[in-house]
Amino acid sequence: MDKIEINLALTFKIPDEGINVNGLLYGLKKANSEIMLGIIKTFFEAFEQKAIERSRDSAKDRLIRYGHQRARTLRTSFGPFKYRFAKLKNMDTSQILIPLREALQIPRYRQYQNEAMEPAIGLSVHLSYNRSDLEVDRILGSGASRWTVWRRLHEFSSSQCHFQDLKKIPYIFLLVDGTKVQLQGPRASNLGKKEMRWALVSKGVGHPFDFAGIWIAWSWEQIAEDLKDRLSYENLEVLLSDGGPGIIENLLAPGMRLQRCTVHAKRDFPYILYQDGLKKKGQREFVDFLNQIPALSFSKERIEKLTEKDKENVREICERTETDFSELIDMLDPDQYPKARTYVQNLAGVVTTFFQWWLDHNEWIPFTTNLIENRFSQVKNRIKRIGRRWSDKGLLKWLMVVIEKIFYPENWDDLWKQYLQINQPLHLVNMRISYRWCFNTT
């Protein structure tokens, strides 16, 4: 392994008085890019010299110096710099070679090097493509255009972000949810609102939920087929969902238990009553009754206080929940409130699965989909408030990057190393720093 020693001497002007720690650090920050770009240029010159020597040795001196290319701008995470690549000419074939470009595998027609795109792509998870570019330009002085950020994000997403085959992982919980997004087609044509849906899986209580898939404008039937191809579906024991149309029919396999989200159960009920023609003032009796049903009024804090001694009490709660649901069904006249009555009938019995699981296994499974919704709120805000309209392909590419950046931040650096194809990174092995004061003798 070769080593290179670069001697660097820095001279700074220091005010006679008034400098504080912030002034010191700010000055160093402003100088950082200039220092690093100088070091990069020195490395290029050193690598180029060695690349020329190796090329001429391998060609048995049939290569001659042939001047330099025009200065080419390379944009890096330290800022832009220009470099004139040396050229060699083969005297036998007249072929022109660029030794440094080949030695460092520098792309021919790219100003923005891949390593410079990480800040903008990371910021575009939270900001618009345009704002992420402006912010990087403000901080580093080398921001790409929003189209470049968009194109490179798609490239990064296609090469690094994929849902794998998960059949070998013993998942037992499946959680699904979705939201509507505004899509656009060719030439910004409005395609209307479509469903964006996602699925997460977990190996059990105490284990994290992992993303199993995310889909744009797919039916639950198509999603079920995809999941059954990539999961050991027969091992799944509990389906957690908000009970949207098509979920139970397609995703609840024989032997699986269903846990309806208790938050959605309460949130959706007024809307169902409104569909039956009952406005807000007339809903109060039914809504208040539903909200006081024991299984729907339980909190995480209350659950965590339960012990083995409380099992009989939990059984009583299950019985009261069943009784209250029956009473509410009787309150809803089938002729006046057919949709609300059917909704409550379907809800009864599937919101107490978390109780039954605790009685059987002495551990609590989630009883809401909030564990994903809370983390997904910033994603939905970016989609609906900043992006506004998306193509299905563009949204999916962006979402794949979002999942890695927000939900698996510990893997982000490794993903970038893979994307940049860093097999043998540069290592600093030693550093010597000294100083001397330069006194003005005049």
Image (tube, helix red, strand yellow):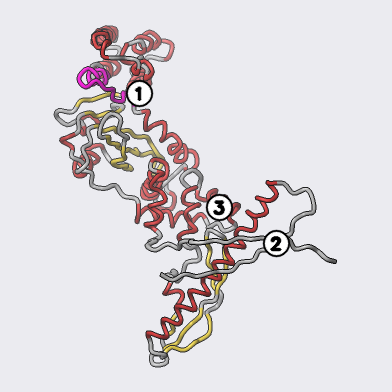
Q: Which badge, 1 or 2, is on the more N-terminal residue?
A: 1
Q: Which mark is residue 436?
A: 2
Q: Which badge, 2 or 3, is on the more N-terminal residue?
A: 3
Identify which residue is drawn at 15% across, 28% down. 255
Left or right: residue 263 compared with residue 37: left
Look at the image and tell me whether residue 346 can be seen.
no
* Camera-nearest label, 2 or 3: 2
Identify which residue is drawn at 39% across, 92% down. 92
Left or right: residue 392 compared with residue 75: left
- Amino acid, disc 3: Val
Of the pair 312 and 244, the residue shown nearer to us: 312
What residue is disc 3 on?
136
Q: Residue furthest toward the bottom?
A: 92
Q: Residue 181 falls in which quadrant of the image?
A: top left
Q: In x, y percent, where is residue 89? A: 45, 87
What range is drawn magenta here? 351-368
Q: Do callouts 2 and 3 mark residues in contact (Cβ within 8 Å)?
A: no
Q: Residues within 10 Å of mark 1 (few under 14, many from 20)?
A: some
Of the pair 361 and 438, the residue shown nearer to us: 438
The reply to whether the magenta stretch includes residue 205 is no
Of the pair 183 and 248, the residue shown nearer to us: 248
Mark 2 element type? loop
Mark 1 element type? helix
